[in-house]
Amino acid sequence: MINWKIEKEIIKNIDLTMLLDELGVDYRNSGEYIRTVCVFHENASKFNLALNRNKKSMICFSHHCEQHEYNLTDFVMKAGNIKERKEAIEFMAKLAGLEIDNKGWNVKPIQYNRKKGLMFKESAIAYRRNISNILPGENKLYLKESDIRKYHSNLKEKKSAIRYLESRGLNEDDMEDYYLGFDCEEERIVFPIYNENGKLKAVSKRIFYNTDENEFKPKYKCLGNKSECLYGYYHLMQKGLDTNNVILVEGTFDAIMLQKYGYSAMALMGCAMSNYQLKILKEMNPDHITLCLDNDSVINEDDAGKEGTLKCINNLSKAGFDLEQISVIQLKGNYQDPDEVPATEFTQFYERRIKGIDYYLMNQVR
């Protein structure tokens, strides 16, 4: 049994953004708070649960919610479908870079070994073994292909949604190739997310216009196991693009636009890389991986776009990718997302990409 003081210390050191990304939980930033759907009461749909970034406390603004009786460990157990409290605490400890002794009485930072200038955890071999053995989680997607066909049919009748997609650089062929749709009830554009075998695993729905009502809604809403997929993997295979040289981006629009330019781009659907996504990459075994995350992908506001990239490099390295296989594209100027960059300029960014190890050594967390 893990001492409650140890549990409190681990919670104190956890990065909430990384935790929510690893759990695959949808959220939005709201100053010192992170807002998400409450997991402690049934039929919750609004982002009523507020997690304090610094205090790691939480409060739900829904009536009759029992969240006040729980802490962050209970949240992780509920959101991650983890049965044992000890397992949830150990899960958080690894994310926080801490290790617990065998008795559960003491905690200390995980010791690092330096290799080729990059910090590797001592447990890198076990880490790779765990990735290779990871299995898909329980499928929580309640949509079927028939629903996707209905959404796709709806899109053809929604002229405002089509105009929005065209303003983002997509044409009718793109909408057909990626089988985009429209949810009339929620007024959102639908991106079906398939695994490498073409099986529907998740659905991402995006608000495409701003209203006072939409101001407090998350821009994206994801259903299913998005952390088990790399968006665009199935499409790049269908297009016959080169799977030996891939680019990892954050969003669906980024992946689509770069594939239109002829690059083998896939989206993490966030700034964090899940273990299952690492497993997919290991099975793909590309010769080279290029990271091109958003400029506004921030964990610490003073290091915009850096920390997410650093963590991806570290995770890829621990998973067994050689440092020479990893490079980074840094967006410059007013460009925030890769999909905003015209094809000719992106080619220039791509040609000026830097080695992952150089990027790491220039920007690694002190």
Image (spheres, rainbow, N blue to C red):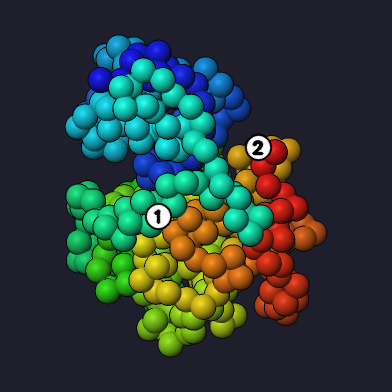
Which x, y percent locates residue 313? 57, 57
Residue at 72 percent of width and 77 percent of height: 351
Q: Amino acid at mark 1?
A: Ile
The mark found on residue 155 in the picture is none
Judged by depth in the image, the label closer to the viewer, 2 or 1, is 1
User: Is 189 drawn above or below residue 32 in the view shown?
Assistant: below
Q: Is residue 213 above or below residue 51?
A: below
Q: Of 237 and 143, which appears nearest the observer?
A: 237
Name the quarter where the N terminus is drawn.
top left
Q: What residue do we see at 71% from left, 53% from top?
A: 361
Q: Residue at x 31, y 27 (%)?
A: 102
Which picture quadrant has residue 74? top left
Q: In the rendered structure, which amino acid carries the disc numbered 2?
A: Asn
* Whether residue 218 is visible: no
* Rendered position, 12 above or below 203: above
Q: Which residue is mark 2?
A: 300
Query: In the visual, does 148 lie left or right of 292?
Result: left
Q: In x, y percent, where is residue 147?
A: 23, 62
- The residue positioned farthest toward the right in the image shown: 333
Q: Nearer the viewer, residue 218 or 135?
A: 135
Helix, strand or loop at mark 2: loop
- For label 1, the SS is helix
Image spot of residue 27 (x, y percent)? 45, 38
Q: Is residue 8 visible?
A: yes
